[in-house]
Amino acid sequence: MRTIETIGEMQNSALSIRTEGQSIGLVPTMGAFHEGHLSLMRAARAENDRVIVSLFVNPVQFSPNEDLDRYPRNLGRDIELAQGEGVDILFVPAVEEIYPKGFCTQVTVTGLSDRLCGENRPGHFQGVATVVAKLFHIILPHRAYFGLKDYQQSVVIRRMVEDLNFNLEIITLPTVREPDSLAMSSRNAYLSQEERTAARCLKESLDLAVQQIEGGERNAGALRSSIRERIGREKEVAIDYVSIADPETLQEVSTLTGEVVIALAVRIGETRLIDNQLVIP
Ligand code: PAF
């Protein structure tokens, strides 16, 4: 596996792979790999001639009060794990490489970026869309792989790809879970043992809502209330939002008439966690 740090070298390599007629699968990441990242790498390995993983902790998608400084970083371990999955190139640019002095362009996917996580994390999806657009230009992938754990992110990126005519396919893969049902996330490492136990309420409340939908409940307000009630039993958990929304527009629904995404964000101590579930009533 090659490690590349500069945009020039990455772009040249991507261009020569394309010139050889080979396909490129990109897995964009911020490192601290877990099984969720590895599942994306495996899918990319199975479907493309070359697999490129980008590892860049993108400062512009963190608000000033967020965890940029303490975001887990372990390059040595990530290199070993990526190598183990047969990744061809690990692209690890420095912050100044991606955002040189004078950088002032932003990609904004309006509307979709302001809902759900966008309400509590202003500027987050602009930061994501901007870096992902840059990665797509630099790495020229045929396919790019994202986890459904970050459901809103995948919707924002799909919209950007369509609106800006990126010639590539977005592939989303299911959330990978820990044995205790917690969605895998680099941020799980921040949780104490008690917080980790309390965090089970995310998946439990999603499962409860699914059961109620299967039992015939179609009133989104009633479903939101029962999710809030289940999470509210955990004293250390504060709800950011409970959303039952259209899976494409992310607009809240009042009655379930077709597929919805149930999406949650909570804070446990200093840690913000999200989870979601797509449901067809
Ligand atoms: O999902 C992530 O890890 C990041 O948001 C991404 C897509 C790599 C952009 O920084």
Image (spheres, rainbow, N blue to C red):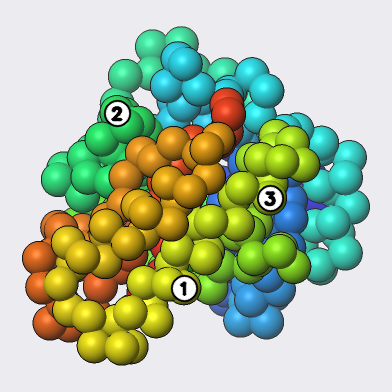
Q: Residues within 10 Å of mark 2 (few under 14, many from 20)?
A: some
Q: Residues within 10 Å of mark 3 (few under 14, many from 20)?
A: few
Q: Residue at x 68, y 70 (%)?
A: 39
Q: Is residue 39 above or below residue 269?
A: below
> Do callouts 1 and 3 mark residues in contact (Cβ within 8 Å)?
no
Question: Can you identify the residue that label 3 sits on?
Answer: 197
Q: Tell me: 174 left or right of 158.
A: right
- Whether residue 139 is visible, yes or no, is yes
The amino acid beneath tag 2 is Pro
Query: Which disc, if any, is residue 207?
Result: 1
Q: Position of residue 147 (x, y in %)?
A: 52, 63
Q: Nearer the viewer, mark 3 or mark 2?
A: 3
Q: Nearer the viewer, residue 12 or 269?
A: 269
Q: Position of residue 2 (x, y in %)?
A: 81, 50
The amino acid beneath tag 3 is Thr
The quarter of the displayed image where residue 260 is located: bottom left
Q: Nearer the viewer, residue 210 or 35?
A: 210
State the CA–CA distance, disc 2 to disc 1: 29 Å
Q: Residue at x 33, y 88 (%)?
A: 214
Q: Residue at x 61, y 48 (%)?
A: 198
State the CA–CA distance, disc 1 to disc 3: 16 Å
The amino acid beneath tag 1 is Asp
The quadrant of the rendering that contains the N terminus is bottom right
Under circle 3, the secondary element is: helix
Query: Which disc, if any, is residue 122?
Result: 2
* Residue found farthest to the top: 101
Under circle 2, the secondary element is: loop
